[in-house]
Image (cartoon, rainbow, N blue to C red):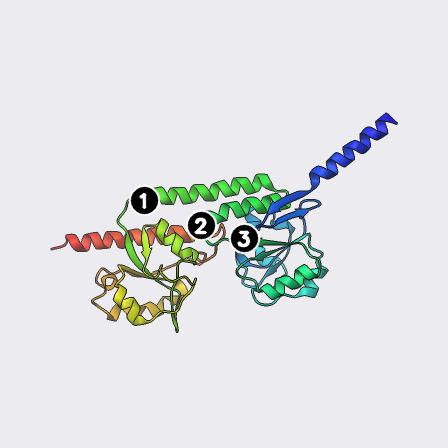
């Protein structure tokens, strides 16, 4: 009898320690009876962070436009930022559905909650948010060791960039994300944070929207030292070169960079930030040489 009671006590203790509680980015304490081994992710950045947390094998559904990491493209797609396949998600029997707090439609998320599915809100808007998100996902999935290792690696990468470019001359930057209409980044976009780390000042940081539309005249008036865009906007940047009075044009600093992950607020952003920092440093050097020339 004593042995039986001891075994029962051990089972109860094991069961109690198997549950996990994690506070999400909506400030809610989410408790699961056991680590989540069937996870639906409803945003590309969430999926990327889940894989970095060591939980990639547990992701059973994801969203459209998920590109990183490459193996995530094999996961079935169950929706996007505006519409999700509720029936398919229910059929996957997820332990948790991780949603993008500011990116997924609230009405769609409410339907998940009404169906009784556990929902975890994630929100990464600055570079400093990325590593903590990886750690939280590691706790949710019971993969804390992998999550901690990769979170520290990401933080070390950011710190290396920060120390490398700290103290260098700051440049004013216009970052173009589209040309028709002309769109840039406001301070809510994580690229604004990346620019700051690299020693750049976003000329439209006073705008609160993540991706505001601006006029050509407004860009000319702010006369940036650098005009930069991703590969998808390369051809449209050529029009700026006609404005020869612009500082960016005079110094040869109308730049196209190959940084497809730069707008992704998750671990895969690091190579994009590295490419941006290098491009700005080259622009900085061109300005120095131009000023030194007779």
User: Label 1: which residue?
Assistant: 166
Circle 2 or circle 3, nearest the eye:
2
Q: Relative to 106, does residue 201 appear above or below in the rendering? A: above
Residue 264 pos. (x, y %): 47, 56
Horizontally, is 148 left or right of 84 in the view?
A: left
| Residue 165, above or below 7 | below
Q: CB atoms at circles 3 and 1 under 8 Å apart?
A: no
| Structural crowding at the residue carrying mark 1, measured as other residues with C-alpha within 10 Å and reported as few (<14), some (14–19) or many (≥20) | some
Residue 54 is at least partly visible in this image: no
Find residue 261 and report its horizontal and vertical position in percent: 45, 56
Give the residue drawn at x 51%, y 43%: 151
Residue at the top extreme?
Answer: 2
Q: Which residue, given by chain and number where applicable, does mark 2 sit on?
A: 127
Relative to 19, say whether 277 is above or below.
below
Which comes before the other along the chain, label 3 or label 1?
Answer: 3
Q: Earlier in the sequence, mark 2 or mark 1?
A: 2
User: Which residue is located at x 56 percent, y 62 percent?
Assistant: 104
Task: Count up the numbered dots.
Answer: 3
Sequence order check: which comes first, mark 2 or mark 3? 3
Q: Which residue is mark 3?
A: 48
**Which element is circle 3 on?**
helix
Instruction: Let me know if residue 6 appears in the view.
Output: yes
């Amino acid at each position: 009898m004593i042995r039986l009671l001891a075994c029962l006590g051990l089972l109860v203790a094991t069961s109690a320690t198997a549950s996990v509680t994690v506070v999400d980015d909506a400030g809610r304490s989410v408790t699961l009876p056991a680590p989540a081994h069937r996870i639906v992710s409803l945003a590309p950045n969430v999926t990327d962070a889940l894989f970095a947390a060591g939980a990639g094998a547990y992701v059973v559904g994801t969203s459209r436009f998920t590109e990183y990491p490459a193996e995530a493209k094999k996961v079935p797609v169950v929706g996007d930022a505006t519409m999700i396949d509720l029936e398919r998600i229910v059929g996957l029997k997820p332990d948790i559905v991780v949603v993008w707090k500011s990116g997924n439609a609230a009405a769609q998320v409410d339907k998940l909650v009404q169906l009784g599915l556990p929902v975890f809100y994630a929100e990464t808007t600055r570079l400093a948010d990325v590593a903590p998100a990886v750690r939280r996902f590691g706790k949710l999935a019971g993969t804390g060791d992998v999550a901690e290792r990769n979170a520290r690696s990401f933080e070390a990468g950011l710190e290396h960039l920060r120390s490398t470019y700290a103290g260098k001359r700051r440049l004013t930057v216009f970052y173009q994300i589209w040309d028709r209409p002309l769109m840039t980044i406001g301070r809510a976009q994580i690229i604004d944070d990346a620019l700051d780390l690299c020693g750049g000042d976003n000329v439209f940081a006073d705008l609160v929207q993540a991706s505001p539309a601006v006029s050509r005249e407004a860009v000319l008036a702010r006369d940036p030292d650098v005009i930069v865009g991703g590969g998808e906007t390369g051809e449209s940047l050529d029009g700026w070169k006609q404005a020869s009075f612009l500082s960016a044009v005079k110094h040869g600093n109308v730049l196209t960079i190959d940084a497809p992950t730069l707008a992704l607020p998750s671990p895969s952003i690091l190579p994009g930030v590295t490419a941006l920092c290098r491009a700005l440093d080259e622009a900085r050097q061109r300005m120095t040489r131009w000023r030194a020339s007779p």
